[in-house]
């Protein structure tokens, strides 16, 4: 009886230690795999679409942010943009055209970019005049070792909303002592109005400006009507000293 109990205990102990060894081996493999991945080069690339506003003008400042999350340094070679082919038949075989370097554009950085672990760089999106940025379906960052890293890129409809830019309204009113200019325009997701007026009545050499931003066309039109019908006439009559 004692011998059978001993054999049973040893069997259980062997099963437990075997399970522990198996689990430890799996954990070790996972840790070695993660360490191996970290030892390799790895880039995370994201697109960002925005505008810089100055005196009623919107300048695109679209960019791609590249982050190095691997231990090996990476030298960036170029950014490749893949356009949506114009003809339907070409769109069916777009991967074939792209592989043969059709409907693509490569943008080289203005200066050498070498990334080490934990560093990042921004590349301003710069394409030739007339290039249909809104038709770009995807983008990749290529390094000098021949690796391609996918850029997080919006869908076609979202992209065209983010990059759109259009002048909407322009108005100037003045008298002998006061001057006021307002510009309305669309940039990206938002509608904007920029108002500029001279700070001191009678002195048209010093101006103050204010930028308004709206999410909808209705909000924009209400503000524009208020400026044209109420605030600017009050400013010219010197009943108020600024646009609000």
Image (spheres, rainbow, N blue to C red):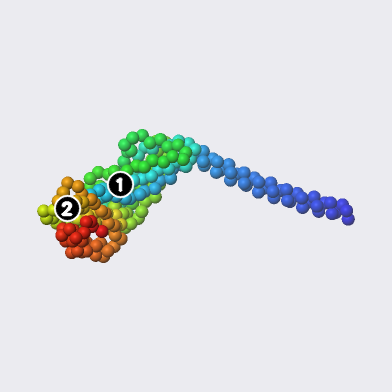
For residue 19, the mark is: none
Looking at the picture, tell me which residue is in the foreground, 25 or 216: 216
Q: Is residue 230 visible?
A: yes
Q: Position of residue 13 (x, y in %)?
A: 77, 50
Give the numbered dot on residue 201. Answer: 2
Q: Quadrant of the N terminus?
A: bottom right
Identified at 29% across, 52% down, the residue is 163
Taking the spot 29% from the left edge, 54% from the top edge, the residue there is 188
**Circle 2 crowding by C-alpha within 10 Å: few under 14, some 14–19, many from 20:** some
Q: Secondary structure beneath disc 1? A: loop
Identify which residue is drawn at 62% across, 44% down.
Answer: 28
Query: How many other residues sit within 10 Å of disc 1, few (<14), some (14-19) or many (≥20)?
Result: some
Q: Residue furthest left?
A: 176
Q: Position of residue 60 (x, y in %)?
A: 28, 48
Q: How many marks?
A: 2
- Identify the residue under disc 1: 61
| Near-viewer residue (76 or 235) | 235
């Amino acid at each position: 009886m004692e011998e059978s109990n001993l054999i049973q205990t040893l069997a259980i102990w062997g099963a437990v230690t075997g399970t522990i060894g198996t689990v430890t081996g799996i954990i070790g493999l996972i840790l070695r795999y993660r360490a191996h991945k970290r030892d390799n080069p790895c880039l995370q690339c994201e697109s960002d679409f925005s505008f810089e506003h100055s005196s009623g003008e919107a300048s695109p400042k679209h960019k791609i942010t590249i982050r190095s999350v691997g231990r090996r340094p990476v030298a960036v070679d170029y950014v490749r943009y893949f356009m949506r082919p114009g003809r339907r038949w070409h769109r069916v075989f777009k991967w074939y055209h792209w592989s043969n370097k059709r409907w693509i554009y490569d943008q080289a950085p203005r200066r050498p970019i070498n990334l080490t672990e934990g560093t990042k760089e921004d590349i301003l999106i710069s394409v030739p005049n007339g290039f249909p940025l809104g038709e770009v379906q995807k983008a990749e960052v290529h390094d000098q070792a021949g690796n391609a890293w996918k850029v997080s890129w919006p869908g076609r409809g979202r992209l065209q909303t983010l990059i759109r830019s259009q002048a909407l309204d322009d108005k100037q009113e003045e008298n002998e002592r006061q001057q006021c200019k307002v510009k309305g325009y669309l940039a990206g997701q938002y509608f904007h109005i920029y108002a500029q007026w001279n700070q001191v009545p009678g002195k048209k050499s010093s101006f103050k400006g204010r930028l308004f931003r709206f999410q909808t066309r209705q909000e924009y039109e209400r503000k524009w009507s208020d400026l044209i019908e109420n605030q600017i006439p009050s400013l010219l009559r010197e009943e108020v000293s600024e646009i609000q």
